[in-house]
Amino acid sequence: MDFSILITNFWSLGLDGLVVGAIYALVSLGYTLVYGVLRLINFAHSEIFMIGTMTVYFVVLQFGFTGYEDPLPLIQFIGLFLLFALAAALVSGGSAVLLEIVAYRRLRNMKASRLSSLISAIGASFVLTEVFRIISDSKNLDFPRLINKDPFFTWGTLYLSADKVLVIVGAAIIFFFLNRIINHTKLGLGIRAVSQDERTAILMGVNVNKVISYTFLLGGVLAGVGSAFYMVFYETTKANVGFLVGISAFTAAVLGGIGNVKGALYGSFALGLIQQYTSAVLGYNWRDVVTFVILVLVLLIRPTGLFGEALQKARV
Amino acid sequence: MTKTTKSSFNLRTKFGDWWEGANSAQRTIFRVVLIGLFFALPMLNNPIINTPETSFYSVLFYPLIMFSLMAVGLNVVVGKSGILDLGYVAFFAIGAYTQAVFSNRTSLNFWETLPFAMGFAMLAGVILGLPALRLRGDYLAIITLGFGEIVRIVAVNTEAIGGSSGLTDIEGPTAIFGMEFTVNDPRPYYWLTLTMLLLVIWGVIRLSHRKPGRAWEAIREDEDVAEFMGVATLKYKLWAFIIGGAVGGLAGAIYASQIRSIQPELFTLNLSIMILACVVFGGMGNIWGVILGAVILGYIPEKLRFLSDYRIVFFGLLMVVMMNIRPNGLLPRQKREKFQEKSK
Amino acid sequence: MTKKLLEVQDILVNFGGVTALNKVNLHVNEGEIAALIGPNGAGKTTVFNIVTGYYTPTSGNVIVDGESVLGLRPYKIARKGLGRTFQNIRLFGDMTAVENVATAADSLNKSGLVGSLFGVPRSRRDETASMEKAHELLKFIGLDHRALQMAKNLPYGDQRRLEIARALALNPKVLLLDEPAAGFNPQEKVELGQLIRKIRDRGFAVLLIEHDMSLVMDISDRVSVLDFGQKIAEGNPGEIQNNQRVIDAYLGVAEDAS
């Protein structure tokens, strides 16, 4: 265990933690929103994210960048970014809606057991991962560096670069709009109503099927945007990228309190920071083990997470 | 006066009717003949059954009977008790690694190592189960998934047990009853596994017809109510894990001794999912169903080799489709109901 | 002095801001049929859930036959002598009737897995005992012709009775019945009343949650009334029927009671 790296790079690790946390947040919102309305963990949400990264890769591929050119001017980059982020949002969102119809809806109508829904979701997750693995020929797909990542501001060991700012600012904008949707629109009201009490929501005239579809759509769109940020920051993807990102995002949602939007945000940033700091001390290999340990600890000690309420017994 | 209900499979009902009516001698003869047939399977050499690329009896060993054994083990956890375990490969891996490490580092032979392989796997079941089984279904599933992955990551990162290169020069079992276990012939391993499978089947059926079986079913049906009826749910869930672990470890040890070298990539999440698919497809909770599922799902990708690359897609689709149209699998658990005239 | 088999002492239950039960005191005496009534949402099923250990109260105590069971897991409380049925029938649907009852009967013995696997004599005896008890209870309740039928295939009335048989298999000191007459026609309710008396005569005390006032008033020795999580009255059926507070709480109980 080496604490020296941790100490010297404390602030830059912190910044990276926030960046990673922002990406996780966008994905974990999908888990938490769907859990809120369905009381079900959407196991295949990680693949919705992966599909977003593939879309981003594909769109940029069309422009013929090889990765060896100079970075684009900022305005051009922003334009390109908006393009592929939008594409990813649409494709991920659409995939999520399709996923709900194919893997979940019928089981919901049949009032199938949770086990059945979970198995169906796992099956869907595997199909998607494998299909893309075959399409990508099991290769890592590298993303060209189109934004200038030279730090434009330094403070000790803290380096502020354009991509990090992009992610943090972009995520903040998204969260602002999300807040408006959840709290100031009819859809948001529907989501909150169904999350709290489905039966009463039905009696109040809420079209639950529609709310559920829109929830999946919203979760997918957020994951799609998150995947765009992911590609800019990490510059690579592969067919099973969803697995580790998904586990982290899910852990973040549970840490914050699954079903709770605010919780998903706080949990994500917290987890991002924890991951960066523990990687510095224990080494990168153990990052995912640490994530899992956190998941287990939270579920055992405080299953409702930081902000969740005991909506249902997580413990038996 | 009793009469039986019709089930959806007439073949199954007919067999069930015969079985009910058969006496002890008839049943024994049936069992002996059936078991004999299974032992004789490796002798089959028929173009219809034969698989391209590998010999049929090699396929019999892996995946057919190996998957069957693991499916029976996983069935106790998922099918009978309703606990979704997504990390079953962990027990398989622990059994295999124990066999490998003991083979390389100790002078114990396969038979002496076997109890350790099963023991460590059972211990893993307890370590995982004690915290995890208190959680509700979805969370439990994720934790088991994590466990499976952690075992693999630890194996990759621990040089002491071979790291990512794994372990080689694993010994095969020493000869027993005059039968030798050589590197090139999978048949003795098949017979060994078949014998173990029969023992496990015997044990599981015994337990199913008694208090443990009722407890597991009650837990699967309605865990809260099972508690209200005095069932110590945590204890029985833990036992399901322990049994599942023991069987997985057993399979892993035999596998390692046959394949003679193992690497962490052999023990992936995909394998957990494949075994789960066997259970789900074959018939959750039904021991014959899951064996049938294992045989079918193991055999098809071997027979239709072009399908092999798409094996996982196939399994995944299968899981989604099965849950939608026939959630209880090919051979659902079915009890034979009997109507009786009211005696009053 | 009559023995109190079940005591609920000063139970306070707060669920995230809502007070479900507010310092409720109840008891059930040996040999009696006690009833717990009150408008919907008064907290009656919550009392059952607290008493059987499903929830832990915010404060207060639950005593079964002189022993506190507070904080014990439900299966331990079941073994200490509380058997219950459920408002919405919760049988083990894919198990036969006799298996349903036997599962509960199993809880009375200490046989474990290893014993069952190897056919150890004690396990064999326990197995026979469980099955015999299950069959005997089914006969007692009038369902032995259904013994080998799947619980989910039974007609509604038989399902309700099967639930009772299952709860009885625990040899409970107090049998907790949660709306056992729901969905019954008047004739069935009369038969149910006779069954409950038969159960009491066999030595089980009964605590009954029920909405059907004629049934309650007919068979109960003592009635407690809950409203908004508080006990507002307790006494024999006659006293309760004439209690103004109770009448007000129900608004319409007068019609049912006649």
Image (cartoon, grey):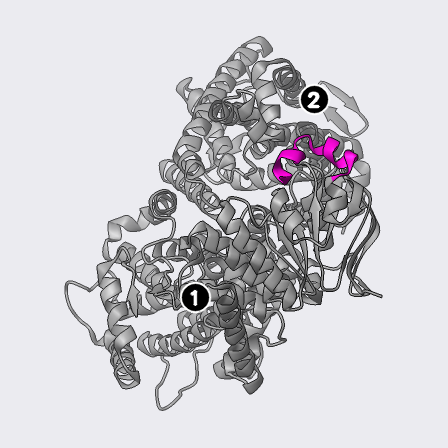
Residue at screen point 30% across, 51% down: B308
Between marks 2 and 1 in the image, the one whose residue lies nearer the viewer: 1
Say what amino acid the circle numbered 1 marks: Ala
**Residue toward you, A295 or C237:** C237
Q: Quadrant of residue B129?
A: bottom right
Residue C147's disc number: 1
Say what amino acid the circle numbered 2 marks: Pro
Mark 1 residue crowding within 10 angstroms, few (<14) / some (14–19) / many (20+): many
Q: Which residues are magenta?
A: C242-258
Q: Position of residue A99 (x, y in %)?
A: 43, 32
> What residue would you read off at disc 2?
A151
Q: Would you say A47 lies left or right of A106 here?
A: right
Q: Quadrant of residue A37?
A: top right
Q: Quadrant of residue B298?
A: bottom left
Q: Residue furthest left?
A: B47
Q: Are marks 2 and 1 on the same chain?
A: no
- What is the chain identity of the residue bearing mark 1? C
